[in-house]
Image (tube, rainbow, N blue to C red):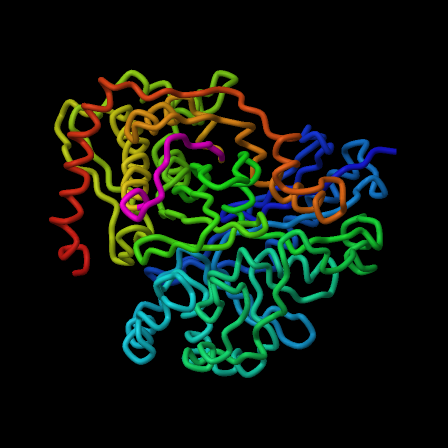
Amino acid sequence: MRDLLLGIDIGTSSCKVAVFEPDGTVVTAKNAEYEVFRPHPGWAEQDPEDWVRGVYDCIRRIFAETDVKAEEIRSIGVDGQSWSAVAIDKDGRVLINTPIWMDMRAQDICDRLNKEVGEQAVFEVSGNPLKPSYTTPKIVWYRENHPDVYEKTDKILQCNSFLVYRLTGEVSQDVSMGYGLHCFDMRKAEWDLDMAKSLGIDESFLPPVFPCTAVVGKVNEEASRATGLAVGTPVVAGGLDAACGTLGAGVARAGETQEQGGQAGGMSICIDEYAADPRLILSYHVVPDMWLLQGGTTGGGGVMRWFEKNFADYERMNTGGGSSLAQLNEIAEKVPAGSEGLVFLPYMSGERTPIWDPDAKGVFYGLDFSKTKGHFVRACMEGVAFALRHNLEVAEAAGAGVDELKAMGGSANSLLWTQIKADVTGKRIVVPASDTATTLGAAILAGTGAGIYSSCAEAVDRTVHTTRTHEPDPEKKEVYDKAYSIYRELYDQLKDTMKK
């Protein structure tokens, strides 16, 4: 009988469930989509039950459609998108849709708390600025706008810990997701109850904190009936999707850096000493005793998903056996570097690091009659790369230099887009198995917790292998330097207008 590991990734637009051999070989993978609800401008929320339905459906299909047996699954790891605020009552029922990381409804709450509690005091504890996309202001928003929900709340969970709860009946908070709450001490990896009180968060809402590789429970009978998983299968605490993707891309040691190409964009630099910067995001890595200095942007692979959905009807109807995204890639490749003056600001849901502006808007600049669909596609790719460069420059100014990026996410499947990022940033980019990096990271946590691996670093050495390398082109870098300066100037010139 095989020893297999199950990795579960709860993404923004879909979940993915994958089964791995201990050497990192993918046995099978399934995915399921779900909705992001936008009932008001600036809002973005999801029904946590949709995550459960999607994941459970994927697991059932794995057992029904493949030769994977439930008893072969040695351990389960779950990762998820950041900064949810899943409010459950004492019976585990979800009380309200959760705002997700793109949600900007709580700006006024952040402004008030930053004055009342003090920006520096909050930052000193949490290592992160208090912004509306984080979990903290969402909890306070519940208290002020849905007191009935707040009063019934027993625990606030993150999306991965919510699924772990559904699988095991155990509540938990992994260290890598702690950064969403500003009462989490980023130096000690524990709750600061004085700060919780200052922020107006009931300390009873806070689950016990666990290392990401810790087994927090086992699959219970209810979850077994719903999924086909074997009762008693260990489930580890899991972690942040960006951190698991970082691990699955091969980043387990200080100085190594991941470039994220999922729905969101950005980068994660692995560091072994506490180093916070208010322009960036600091979290614990899923690797013990490591942190991640992160840049997180709203414009990543989701930009191309948006463009394809709204402007690629022709490509969808004429795939010729390929895909609409592949055709968009082809027409973008025919456009010169710099998109002949078309510059795109990828602020499609406000923007996070490093500008932290919930009012930021997406912008195309440089239109004329010569521009084609290919120009727009390439400008989208370049705009996302400019956002990455902006974050890298801030990180380097903060003392975290980067020479090489390890790419992950669906965007890394595009050779053109990955090369654009290399050319824009001037950094070498290496690509492992990009589609499975995040679920592999979750599976590595599961395997480490189950004793299959001695450490996360040993697991990376066994499972992660480079598939290709992109070296920056100095000539194109000169073209992009000029376009990047326009990119930076556009936001500076338009940011006041964007608030109107």
Residue 191 vs residue 89: left or right?
left
Residue 496 vs residue 394: left or right?
left
The spot of residue 66 in percent (x, y) is: 78, 32
Residue name at image x 70 percent, y 45 percent = 448
Residue 23 vs residue 295: left or right?
right
The spot of residue 351 in percent (x, y) is: 31, 52
Q: In the picture shown, does residue 198 fall above or below 234?
A: below
The one of 224 and 449 positioned closer to us in this rendering: 449
Residue 300 sits in which quadrant? top left
Judge whether residue 341 is colored magenta. Answer: no
Judge whether residue 399 is colored magenta. Answer: yes
Q: In the picture shown, does residue 114 fall above or below 253?
A: below
Residue name at image x 48 percent, y 16 percent = 320
The one of 270 and 36 positioned closer to us in this rendering: 270
**Outermost residue toward the right in this view:** 1
Q: In the picture shown, does residue 16 fall above or below 65?
A: below
Q: Quadrant of the C terminus?
A: bottom left
Residue 346 sits in which quadrant? top left
Task: Report the number of numbered marks.
Answer: 0
The spot of residue 168 in percent (x, y) is: 74, 60
Residue 281 sits in which quadrant? bottom left
* Magenta highlight range: 395-408
Q: In the picture shown, does residue 143 fall above or below 239?
A: below
Q: Quadrant of the N terminus?
A: top right
Residue 21 vs residue 475: left or right?
right
Residue name at image x 59 percent, y 59 percent = 174
